[in-house]
Amino acid sequence: MSNEQGISRRNLVKMGGIGAIGALGALALGGCATGSASGAGGAGGGADALAAPLSDEERLASISDPIYMGGKTNASGQALEMGTGKQGQIANQAMIDKREEYNSQLHKVTDRVYCAVGNGLANSTMIIGDTGIIIVDTNESMEAARLDLDLFRTVTDKPVAAVIYSHDHYVNGTKLYVGDGNPQNLPIIAHENFVSVMNSTLAETNDTYVPRALMMFGSLLPTEGEDATVMGGIGAYYKNPNVKSATAGFIAPSTLIPSVEKAAMTPLTIDGVDFEFYPMESDSPANINVYLPGENVAISNTVWPCFFNMYTLRGAIYRDPTVLYESIDTMLAWKPVAHVGAHGVPIMGAEAVQKELTLYRDCIQFVYDQTVRHMNKGMDPDAIVEAVKIPAFMLEGMCTKPLYGEVEHYIRGVYRGIVGWFGTDPLDLHPVSRKFESGKIVEAMGGAENVVRAAEAALEDDQFAWAATLATYVLNLDAENAGAKAAKAQAFRKMGQVTFASNTRHYYLTNALALEGKVTIPTSIPLNASKLGVAKRSLSLDLLRVSLDPEKALDVEKSLAFTFTDEGITETLSIHNCVGQVIDGAIDNPTVELKMTYPVMCEIMSGKTKLDDAIAAGSVEVVGSADELAALRELFERKL
């Protein structure tokens, strides 16, 4: 069982409940503990021991972060204080307090530089040029961008002269600034790898990445009540609830900044303002930080208003901490008088910038160095997260509070990024299945009824993670066990309430509501048609390739070609040996060829148009047998 589901196997023996291990052993040996192996249940020894109240010392020893087992401080010794938010949210008070920083507001940095905060998860920054304005990041939608622009228009009515993308995450408001299609050909500046990195989130893992992102950002949670979102950790919220819709207005960049391998810095003068562009990885490999020498102001997506998210729950490539803190060292060397982030309020004053950025980079280096230190002792990730405790004072800076992600997850991310999935115990090379393990534990505890009763008793003693673990043993055998679902949902709710980290809160509460049948976590997500428009033309075939059902494709040797008539490009998916090989270009005699313009393909893959409808309307020409096309479509779980 993974640590995310509850308490690890290794910690099982530490629990007051497996002070009940003796009772489990007695049952396994035919002893006299109460309860039958068939699950008849009943009062008695094993379950009572498993539900025994824990002392403060036992809570500390039971899990890497004791707040998830009823402790009053987190792993670093920060005190837990609960509160109630304005919409009735029950949450960690530190999270409620941080939300007040993110109210919609325009912050003046210098006479030229202004930052709009609070209209989305990210900021938008305006630099006033000689004749126009330069916008850094355009927020998550056209509607959110409108709120930013309204704030900017309280300062100046100069037209837009250029747009800069710090990275690929908050770029959907661009059409508002430059017009549909960018008719004036205004510069839209980004890292040279911007498009390829943006497309990586649209690639084969889209149906994994997006649902996890929805859970992480709290997109499926209610807007009021105890389970509502409080804030987005690094911003007010992801997807502004104060706008009626979220229209994507992305436009591809036109001016590209070379990667660091080609140039450590690229200078440009835009509308009379000198810019220095530094390609530096952050939460995106295609990230650029900006220095304005005339203003002595740094603008970056590296320094956030919370501890940097060295690992993200939605999943991403490894975020190398050494690259991160070295990029902050570069910014510190500028000695700026202000730092404007892609998230959070600006840091004002040269002394404050030096202090806060130094502490921020030191926190990142601490986690990396101490993880490696203990890794070099032969410790596995479970042991390392228990051993590495970042001092509480380091988590009290303006930018270092763990209100977005968690240090434990960062440690695990560093370990996996360096070593991979395998720890040190050969047991993990070929573990028994979760179902088998759960069956043996439930049997030893006297059956499912006993285990559920123990989970409920654990909840009464605030042993939240243990209650979730016990309930999971039952659910691994019977996914619809009502008592286990209720206990696990309540355990997750309590863990979501006490956490300091917004991502953790959202993940726990979303899954609690899913267990209760109140939300449905999507398993297939429509693609963004505007972003597909700038993707590599084989992307749609890649999405089909990874949805191929090998049982249906057994002994199949066929091919499906897509010809985009407006571009003269053909991409082919050749099926053989239960895989789909993507071939750039045409092949001789494909089984079926579909001819269409590429915008039609984008409409089909984004779900806006059905293939059958496009064929009927004449937008798609089928070359080959309709029956063969139908047979090919049946091979894929992703439906055309």
Image (spheres, rainbow, N blue to C red):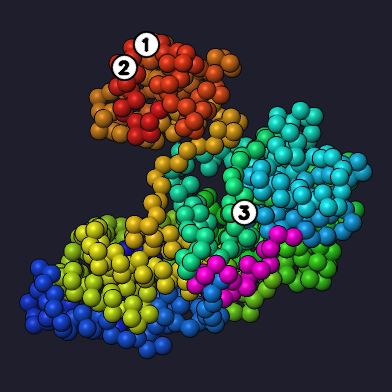
| Tag of residue 242 | 3
Marks 2 & 1, CB-CB < 8 Å contact: yes
Look at 81% across and 62% down and name the residue there.
338
Q: Distance between the Cα atoms at labels 2 and 3?
A: 49 Å
Density class for disc 2 (Cα within 10 Å; few <14, some 14-19, many ≥20) is some
Q: In this view, does 455 lie to the left or right of 108?
A: left
The residue beneath circle 2 is 628
Regarding residue 457, the answer to whether it shows in the image is yes
Q: Which amino acid does label 2 sit on?
A: Glu
Density class for disc 1 (Cα within 10 Å; few <14, some 14-19, many ≥20) is some
Q: Position of residue 498 (x, y in %)?
A: 48, 74
Marks 2 & 3, CB-CB < 8 Å contact: no
Q: What stretch is highlighted in magenta?
A: 86-105
| Tag of residue 529 | none
Q: Position of residue 369 (x, y in %)?
A: 57, 68
Of 578 and 612, the residue lying toward us: 612
**Kind of element beneath mark 3:** loop
| Tag of residue 624 | 1
